[in-house]
Image (spheres, helix red, strand yellow):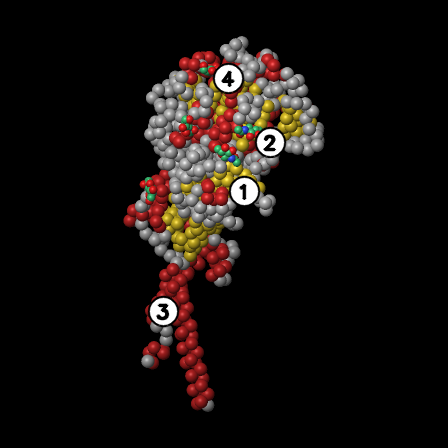
């Protein structure tokens, strides 16, 4: 009895000693990190001090389509960080809850593991933070979340087992969503590795760094697009295509296009791809290489038409197609709209389209032994035989390249590769070809991943492709009678190099001259995500609801249509209010294009009237309906059922405020906190004992006195 009264139990004292020791470790670590600010005065201050946010990180968010969920949702709270590689080494991935820190080289394996049924890893993983190497260093040799046959559901042939993309992991449509995943920026990755290393050095025992990840999504309980649109917890992924035809209309004269007959050749290129982390969507090789080549060819062809001074016998309609990463949404919509006899894209109706030339991936054509780069023409069945003149146009353009390019026809493929042309070739009997840098397998090791960025792209390969396409298109337009018309190679090269810099770098990125002269954008990194469409705009030609990139493409096509020898001559064109002020363009056949004069203060108006047949075209499914209810609120719906419609109709979930977020901080752990609680209670008890003894003592003394 006396012993117990004499002091606190020794076990508690030992726990307290251990606790104080680990506290000291923690404090000394913190002191090292924050010596300037001094030591924190309370645990709360302490916690605040070490919480690190990752504002630059890109989250995977919840997307839905007609057949399920895709992407990420969920919350992780105070879950310890662990390297993926260490987790796999221990019990093959099983264990307590963790947020995994994944080096890029392990990312394909990690995601495949996460997606596989019955994986022991998937059960305990509450989130993932992907850390990146500098300038693309440390990347895996391939990482493609796309399917082995991307867009196979839209293929105009039955061999769905063909592997266009052998490294495809099939992760874009997972069926069920994943836990929160973030890709950190290169700078954030540096800071972050230090924390992960601390946990590793401590043998993953407390005190250690833990993460709070919030990727709560309002559509989490909805199984697919039909349900979330019905519950108004998501919005359709929208986007626009941009189209323009050459030659441009002759302003004012109603009969201006008389020399050009009805026929037109449609030139297609895709704008952007999809990706698990769609904020990082670039699609450099998969789509931007072809788009840059097509856009540069458009300018060169317009210049060539102007120089020749004779109207070509065939019109060329260019369409830069948006939202293709989401179930070929843009091209499927384009075909549908073109099919309506009262709709024309850039003045061209479906019945007038005599051929389709798609500029596909062209950024990875490597020189062969002789130094020539090899490109492939993938024809729809019978097209090469039926359209010899098109074949010869490309052959002659390759000859003009003076050995820098050779053209081949693929052997051993089941038909055209995954492309926008697929949407056309199943429709009526339009013939066409896909021009690409690959034969039987895509060259791109990073198809539909954020690693398909500027590092995965060879500007020279894009330039030579642009030269071939431009040369061939001029011949096609004049139907072989091009009178030895030359392509302005210098112009072509500077545009290819310029567009690549604007769209694939962050310096200058969208702040480049090429963009800034014809569009307003505060962005540096071009965003290629099409974005959501919140309501059905009354006027789909209004630039205000378009993304910066799409507005730029419109402005680019508009100002290049006339083929001016000196682009700055646009500055001398009649002024107008861009986009929709009082001052309109006076003549039919003109549009008001944004123009920033380099001679400052010369003209107050921000637009110029240029002759062009340029237009925006919606890139979301025509099965989507928008209705405004009695309450005045609009609502999206789908006219059809999952069984009846082929469109994938991708939607993006609404996010709650302050989502998604990622923070990481030092935490002492459950055992420690329990110890703290017990020690705290013990201390209280001890204190009461002491009080009791003291007062008894005092009382005794008092009594004694
Ligand atoms: C995973 O399991 C679900 C049902 O539990 C099944 O529908 C699906 O086909 C499985 N996926 C794989 C890849 O085995
Ligand atoms: C292609 O056409 C066939 C026949 O009309 C149709 O059954 C099929 O669903 C179409 N496929 C696509 C992807 O449109
Ligand atoms: C064709 O387009 C016109 C004009 O936009 C529209 O009124 C009509 O409903 C469309 N027809 C079909 C069959 O979609
Ligand atoms: C391609 O061939 C088809 C079928 O013969 C023909 O209708 C079409 O006009 C041709 N297109 C061109 C551009 O020659
Ligand atoms: C294209 O332009 C770039 C940059 O100005 C230059 O480095 C490159 O040599 C040019 N390529 C050709 C083929 O002219
Ligand atoms: C719904 O689809 C059907 C058949 O595809 C069509 O006839 C009908 O006009 C559509 N309704 C609306 C409101 O778009």
Residue 12 tag number:
3
Q: CA distance from mark 2 to mark 4?
A: 28 Å
Q: Which type of secondary structure does the marked residue at label 4 adopt?
A: helix
Please indicate, yes or no, whether residue 268 appears anywhere in the rendered image: yes
Q: Quadrant of residue 139?
A: top left
The response on whether ligand 6 sits within 8 Å of label 1 is no
Q: Are marks 1 and 3 in contact (CB under 8 Å)?
A: no
Q: Nearer the viewer, residue 289 or 541?
A: 541
Q: Is residue 308 left or right of residue 135?
A: right
In x, y percent, where is residue 622? 51, 33
Neighbourhood count class around disc 1 (C-alpha, 10 Å): few under 14, some 14–19, many 20 upward: some
Earlier in the chain: of badge 2 and badge 1, it is: 2
In x, y percent, where is residue 465? 46, 21
Earlier in the chain: of badge 1 and badge 3, it is: 3
Residue at point 44% right, 82% down? 695
Q: CA distance from mark 3 to mark 2?
A: 74 Å
Residue designated by label 2: 541
Residue designated by label 4: 473
Q: Which type of secondary structure does the marked residue at label 3 adopt?
A: helix
Q: Which type of secondary structure does the marked residue at label 2 adopt?
A: loop
Which tag is nearer the camera, tag 3 or tag 2?
2
């Amino acid at each position: 009895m006396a012993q117990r009264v004499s002091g606190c139990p020794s076990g508690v004292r030992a726990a307290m000693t251990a606790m104080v020791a680990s506290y000291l470790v923690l404090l000394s670590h913190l002191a090292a990190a924050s010596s300037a600010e001094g030591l924190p005065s309370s645990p709360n201050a302490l916690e605040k001090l070490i919480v690190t946010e990752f504002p630059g990180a890109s989250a995977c968010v919840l997307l839905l389509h007609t057949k399920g969920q895709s992407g990420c949702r969920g919350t992780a709270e105070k879950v310890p960080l662990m390297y993926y590689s260490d987790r796999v080494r221990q019990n093959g991935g099983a264990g307590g809850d963790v947020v995994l820190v994944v080096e890029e080289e392990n990312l394909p394996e990690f995601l495949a593991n996460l997606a596989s049924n019955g994986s022991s890893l998937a059960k305990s993983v509450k989130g993932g933070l992907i850390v990146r190497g500098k300038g693309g260093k440390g990347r895996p040799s391939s990482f493609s979340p796309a399917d082995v046959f991307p867009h196979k559901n839209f293929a105009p042939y039955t061999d769905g087992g063909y592997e266009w993309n052998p490294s495809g992991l099939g992760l874009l449509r997972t069926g069920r969503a994943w836990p929160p995943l973030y890709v950190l920026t290169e700078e954030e990755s540096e800071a972050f590795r230090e924390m992960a290393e601390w946990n590793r050095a401590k043998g993953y025992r407390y005190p250690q760094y833990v993460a709070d990840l919030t990727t709560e999504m309002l559509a989490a309980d909805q199984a697919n697009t039909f349900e979330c649109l019905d519950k108004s917890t998501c919005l359709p992924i929208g986007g626009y295509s941009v189209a323009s035809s050459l030659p441009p209309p002759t302003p004012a004269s109603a009969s201006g296009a008389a020399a050009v007959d009805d026929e037109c050749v449609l030139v297609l290129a895709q704008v952007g791809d999809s990706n698990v982390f769609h904020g990082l969507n670039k699609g450099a090789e998969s789509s931007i290489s072809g788009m840059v080549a097509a856009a540069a060819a458009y300018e060169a062809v317009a210049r060539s038409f102007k120089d020749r001074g004779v109207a070509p016998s065939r019109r060329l309609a260019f369409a830069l197609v948006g939202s293709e990463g989401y179930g070929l949404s843009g091209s499927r919509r384009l075909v549908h709209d073109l099919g309506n006899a009262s709709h024309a894209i850039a003045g061209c109706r479906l019945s007038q389209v005599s051929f389709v030339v798609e500029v596909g991936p062209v950024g990875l054509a490597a020189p062969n032994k002789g130094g020539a780069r090899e490109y492939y023409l993938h024809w729809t069945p019978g097209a090469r035989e039926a359209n010899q003149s098109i074949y010869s146009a490309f052959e002659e353009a390759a000859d003009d390249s003076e050995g820098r390019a050779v053209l081949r026809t693929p052997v051993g493929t089941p038909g055209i590769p995954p492309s926008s042309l697929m949407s056309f070739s199943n429709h009526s009997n339009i013939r066409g070809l896909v021009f690409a840098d690959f034969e039987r397998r895509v060259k791109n090791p990073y198809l539909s991943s954020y690693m398909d960025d500027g590092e995965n792209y060879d500007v020279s390969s894009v330039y030579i492709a642009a030269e071939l396409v431009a040369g061939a298109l001029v011949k096609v337009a004049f139907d072989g009678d091009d009178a030895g018309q030359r392509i302005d190679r210098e112009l072509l090269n500077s545009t290819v190099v310029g567009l690549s810099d604007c769209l694939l770098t962050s310096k200058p990125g969208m702040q480049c001259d090429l963009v800034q002269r014809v569009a307003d954008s505060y962005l540096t990194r071009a965003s290629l995500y099409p974005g959501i469409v919140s309501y059905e705009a009354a006027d789909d030609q209004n630039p205000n609801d378009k993304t910066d990139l799409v507005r730029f493409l419109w402005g680019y096509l508009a100002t290049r249509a006339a083929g001016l020898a000196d682009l700055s001559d646009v500055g001398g064109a009649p002024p107008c209010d861009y986009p929709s002020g009082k001052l309109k363009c006076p003549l039919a056949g003109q549009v008001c294009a944004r123009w920033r004069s380099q001679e400052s203060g010369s003209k107050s108006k921000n637009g110029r009237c240029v002759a062009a047949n340029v237009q925006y075209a919606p890139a979301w499914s025509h099965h989507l309906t928008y209705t405004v209810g009695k309450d005045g609120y609009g609502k999206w719906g789908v006219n059809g059922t999952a069984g009846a419609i082929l469109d994938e109709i991708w939607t993006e979930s609404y996010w709650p405020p302050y989502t998604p977020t990622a923070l990481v901080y030092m935490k002492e752990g459950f055992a420690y906190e329990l110890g703290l609680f017990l020690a705290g209670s013990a201390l209280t008890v001890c204190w009461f004992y002491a009080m009791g003894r003291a007062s008894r003592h005092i009382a005794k003394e008092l009594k004694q006195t």
